[in-house]
Amino acid sequence: MVLLEKLKDEIVITPITLEEAQPFILKHYIGEKPRGIQKIYGVYHKPSGNKLVGTAIYGKPRKQATTVVQPEVSSEEVIELQRLFLEDYVNTKNIESYVISHTLKLIKQDFPSVKVVITFADEKAGHVGSIYQATNAIYLGKGSEKKHKYVYILRGNLKALHNLLQNKPYPKLQK
């Protein structure tokens, strides 16, 4: 709990423009703007002089991405965490988990019809979703594009979605 209080004192998360986020989009390993952006949150680090140090970008998922949560949720009730980027020099423990947790709360406020947030970890880039695992995201397995699928349930009792969890332990990084 002390760690969370420290992060609350050091980090401010607020909506920003695409123009403000552009440098972080280019630094992300994908290096390009995602399609269908709906909300961009900037991560400001007080100890660095209230400097913008990262972004979390949410948007409309591709149609095929929403099939992993249908028919329990319609495509209008799903948003995707499309990009998360934080500068490496912000060496604050658990900052990624904190940013995800805080932005999920903001999504819940900003998009009252959204029930599910979906996100992916790209195995081709060496990712298995360790950050999502640390935030207790629901793991739905691996898709055909070698991407691990994770969801967060923001509202609703989606028992069918929880049942998809059976026998799907979190993947581990290959060493």
Image (cartoon, rainbow, N blue to C red):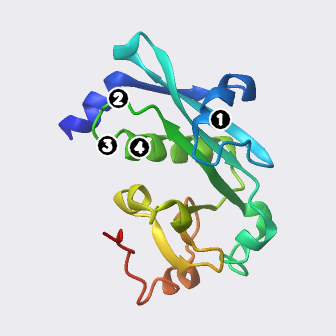
Tell me the SS state at disc 3: loop
Q: Quadrant of the N terminus?
A: top left
- Where residue 166 appears, as percent x and y from the top left, is 43, 88
Query: Which callout, 4 or 2, points to the residue nearer the camera?
Result: 4
Please name the amino acid that badge 2 sits on.
Lys
Please name the amino acid that badge 4 sits on.
Glu
Label 3 packing within 10 angstroms: few (<14), some (14-19), many (20+): some
Where 104 sits versus 19, above or below?
below
Residue for badge 2: 8
Q: Which of the two labelled residues, at mark 1 and mark 2, occupies the earlier sequence position?
A: 2
Q: Which mark is residue 91?
A: none
Residue for badge 3: 94
- Where residue 118 appears, as percent x and y from the top left, is 61, 62
In the figure, residue 60 lies in which quadrant?
bottom right
Q: CA distance from mark 1 to mark 2?
A: 27 Å
| Residue situated in front as seen by the camera: 149 or 156 | 149
- Evaluate if marks 4 and 2 touch, with contact meaning CB atoms under 8 Å apart: no
Residue reaching furthest to the left: 2
Q: CA distance from mark 4 to mark 2?
A: 13 Å
Q: Which mark is residue 96?
A: 4
Q: CA distance from mark 3 to mark 1?
A: 23 Å
Please name the amino acid that badge 3 sits on.
Asn
- Where residue 6 appears, as percent x and y from the top left, is 26, 28
Label 1 packing within 10 angstroms: few (<14), some (14-19), many (20+): few
In the figure, residue 22 lies in which quadrant?
top right
Residue reaching furthest to the bottom: 167
Q: CA distance from mark 4 to mark 3?
A: 6 Å
Name the residue rendered at 64%, 51% in the picture. 82
Where 95 sits versus 47, above or below?
below
- Evaluate if marks 4 and 3 touch, with contact meaning CB atoms under 8 Å apart: yes
Residue 22 lies left or right of residue 130; in this view the side is right
| Residue situated in front as seen by the camera: 59 or 153 | 59
